[in-house]
Image (cartoon, rainbow, N blue to C red):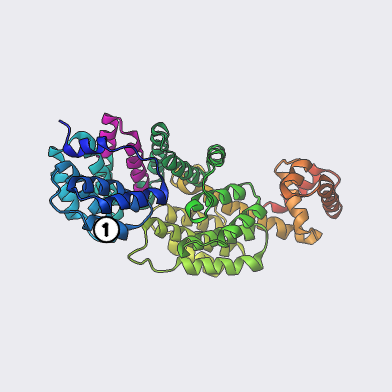
Amino acid sequence: MISASHALRSSLPERRLHGEELLRDLERRFRNSRDALERAHLADRLVPELVSVAQPERAAQVLANIGELVPDPDARARLSALRGVVRAMAGESPADDLAAALALLPAIPGPTQAVVRQRAGVASAYSRDALGCEEHSLAALTLCDRYGMRGLGSRAAGVLYGLYYHLTGDLQAARYYAELATSLADSSGDTTTRRSFLVAQYDLACVFADWDRAGSLRELIRRDRLPEPVPARLPTRIGDALMFGQRGDFNAMRAHLEATLSAEVQPIDRAFVMALHALALAGLGCKSEANPVARQALALSNMHQNRDEMLHLAIRRKLAGVLAAWASVVVGDAYHGMRALGVRSKWPGSTGTLAAALESEARGSAFDTQNPSIAQVRGYLIVAQRARLGNLALEAAVPFSLTQTEVDVLRAVAQGKSNAAIALERGVTRNAVERRLMSAYEKLDVKTRGEAIAKISRLLRPE
């Protein structure tokens, strides 16, 4: 049996508006409508749009203008679940609204049950109820699969991605649901959600040090022409920085992070970007510059978590503190760095694992790179180790009076790059690269690339 609400929704023409234009159109129609059921349907379309652009106050105003006695259980269940989402976003408890929505499940059709369950999952995520979020979102996924609702299924999978990434720290599970959300969004034609989870997959591939996959995903993101504002693309920019760092290209990493810092980012995200920036500076041997940056990142990461801070920001803040502490160790501030790492290694989850591994490496004890417990932080570990090697390379080069540019060119040679590739990467002529190489050979008293690499390698060998 088709509900009255479903019949009304089916009778309305499809809208092909987007963004602010869609919001204005829905708000105008909502204000002008006098029919209770039509207003309920318009609110059901308008409120999720407002939630998606983080405007819970406007969403709450819309819901406040909806009569409590909407004459259809289908619409009542949808709106009760929506009210739960909006209240959870505002820091209030969604329990009563979710209970009212779930009580109506036996009276509503399966597709609406999927919608209600998905919204209950979102509300539970905002209220940090991990068990409720998992239960409702998995139920929504099952119903979406049964009724072929791939677009809604992609959003339910996205909530599960957020649950495992931000609430539980289970990045393996987060990776699975990011892939599922991308696939479902792709098959449903939801390009916005697909793009969002391509970025999530790229972020995770870099954290797991799955560089080949990260490269493929980055190419997909470029082809999709994602919008450019930094706050919306911060995970992509951090992934890019890790990609540069794992290749030992700390000049590119530094420039990339400086561009990110010049834009408007949240204080916690700024701490994380600054910590990576300190690692890039350490990799370039710029101790005098890296030390104050690491100290600032450490200070920002020590901010007390306030009630309104989202959990993913708290996790990023902890990672910022670990990486900033490591940068302090690399540039010679061992007292503060080792003390901070010792404290942070006692934290649960991937943050503590990263701190413990870095503390072990700083004390001269190599960690097991194949240990599955560090899989979720391997990308950070690789970049941190490259930063230390880059710093040592410059210290070892000092007796030979090599310039930083000569060291950068030698490092590129050691990575197997041709003179032409180095010239293209650095934006100089091939002759300029060859002149710097010849100058470096003369200072090192060698004649070939192989001899130069061997000499630098010997200098890097631990005593």
Q: Residue at x 44, y 53 (%)?
A: 353
Residue 377 image point, x, y percent: 48, 49
395 relative to 150, above or below: below
Which amino acid is tagged 1?
Ala
Q: Which residue is mark 1?
A: 60
Q: Is residue 157 magenta?
A: yes
Above or below, comparing residue 395 to residue 159 in the picture: below
Q: Position of residue 51 (x, y in %)?
A: 33, 52
Asked if residue 450 is among those painted magenta in the image, a careful observer would answer: no
Q: Quadrant of residue 395?
A: bottom right
Lateral position of residue 143 relative to residue 25, left or right: left
Q: Could you say which is closer to the camera, residue 335 or residue 70? A: 70
Q: Position of residue 397 (x, y in %)?
A: 76, 57
Q: Circle 1 sits in a helix, a strand or a loop, which is it?
A: helix
**Magenta part of the protein: which range?**
139-163
Residue 326 shows in this picture? no
Q: Main secondary structure of the magenta part?
A: helix
Work out which quarter of the rendered image holds the N terminus and state it.
Answer: top left
Residue 189 falls in image quadrant: top left
